Amino acid sequence: MSIEKDRISTPQMVILGLFTLIGDMALVYPTTMTAQAHQDAWIAALISIPLGLAAVFLMVTVANINANKNIIELSQQILGKWIGGAVGLYYLIFFLLGASTYVREIEDFMCTQIYEGTPGGVIRFMSIVILVYGLRLGLESLGRAAQVFFPLFSLFLVCLLLLLFPQVRLERIYPMFVTPFPDMLHTIMFGVFYPFGELCVFFMVYPYARKNSKTNRHIFISVVLGALGLNLILFLSLTVLGVYFSEHNFYAAYILAQKINIADFLQRLEALMATAWIISTYFKTALYFYAFVLGSAQLLKLKSHRPLIFPVAFLIYGLSQIIAKNIIFYVKEIPDYWVDWDFTVSFVLPLILLIASKLRKQVAAS
């Protein structure tokens, strides 16, 4: 019997999925995609949508092998105690590093763009406190909170995007189709596994959602909407800021919000962009935190995951500090390796689990 008793509705899971897909990507996606594809980044991003949906389809298919078990339980069911346990441990390491990285991103963003001069440890501590509070309330409370904040998040994001359209200059994305094929392929891989691959955290949430006949359809609709939102941010970054600023400014979307100026009256709305980003990143971080705590409790055969919340909070606090020397380090060094993590946990391991499950069924049938 599962140690998780809370349940969330399909709409709550879908909203959490949107927050996870957009999450920290809302600010860093333009920089990541333009690093190699330059003005062709929007083309690579569009190509990545159907490929990303295929990756999500694979993950949903694997999750439905046994819809009542998360990836820790499922991997042991399919691959056995030891190999399955190793796969589960691999996912747990990814969830821990993910949660720590997102806390660090919040710290660096707040300390460099909004609260300049504030010690990073203060922002990090405040983030951890709010995360611990959310996890102590439980998964169901996180789902309800996501429903409450989603209209506010959507309003901020839509308003920001609409107000930027008067500044669009299409000539900034010319000439097109000039990126060498290897660079374009590499950018497409980023576009697929950076945002879509990180939805693998829902392997730990999917079993606790009250599902119905339309659940899978709602999942894919939300993924498409989230992907279109990210691609729209990228397109506006290229056509408003230009290729150079999109590529060399880590917080391109935040700079975009600073460009809004309607009749010299409606301007300086970057705080809205920051609010929308913090809301989505909070829920993404909370899910990764929750996935690590719950998975660790299951792997260790504990009766409850709640006693692990505070120790893991201290672990994330320290790890988020040592995970990178500074913001430049994880802008330049981490992405090339992180996309391999995403590729492994969202495609390679789910594919292995799916094939192993099919083989076990064939052997059992014969």
Image (cartoon, rainbow, N blue to C red):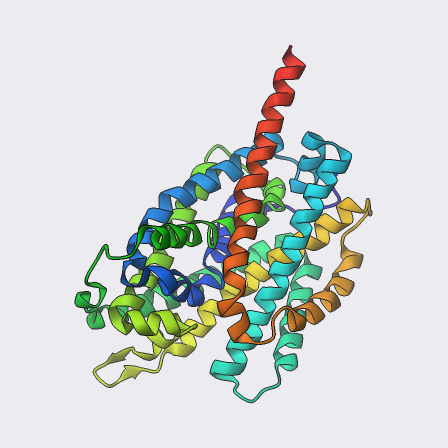
Vertical position of residue 350 compared to residue 331: above or below: above
Residue ranking furthest to the left: 171
x, y percent for residue 268: 35, 82
Residue closer to the observer: 40 or 142: 40
Give coordinates of residue 115: x percent, y percent: 52, 85
- Measured as percent of width and height from the top left, residue 84 is found at 71, 37
> Residue 195, image x and y in percent?
46, 54
Foreground of the two, 278 or 255: 255
Quadrant in the picture for the N terminus: top right
306 vs 365: above or below: below
Q: In this view, does 338 lie above or below 315?
A: above
In-front residue for pair 180/266: 180
| Residue appearing at x 21%, y 83% in the figure | 263
Q: Can the viewer see residue 199 in this picture?
A: yes
Residue located 63% across and 46% down the image: 204
Q: Is residue 86 left or right of residue 20?
A: right
Residue pictured at 38% horizontal, 60% vertical:
33
Write down the quadrant of residue 41 in the picture: bottom left
Looking at this view, name the residue that lies furthest to the bottom: 117
Q: Is residue 237 left or right of residue 28?
A: left
Q: Is residue 90 above or below residue 54?
A: below
Q: Quadrant of residue 54?
A: top left
**Image quarter of the C terminus:** top right
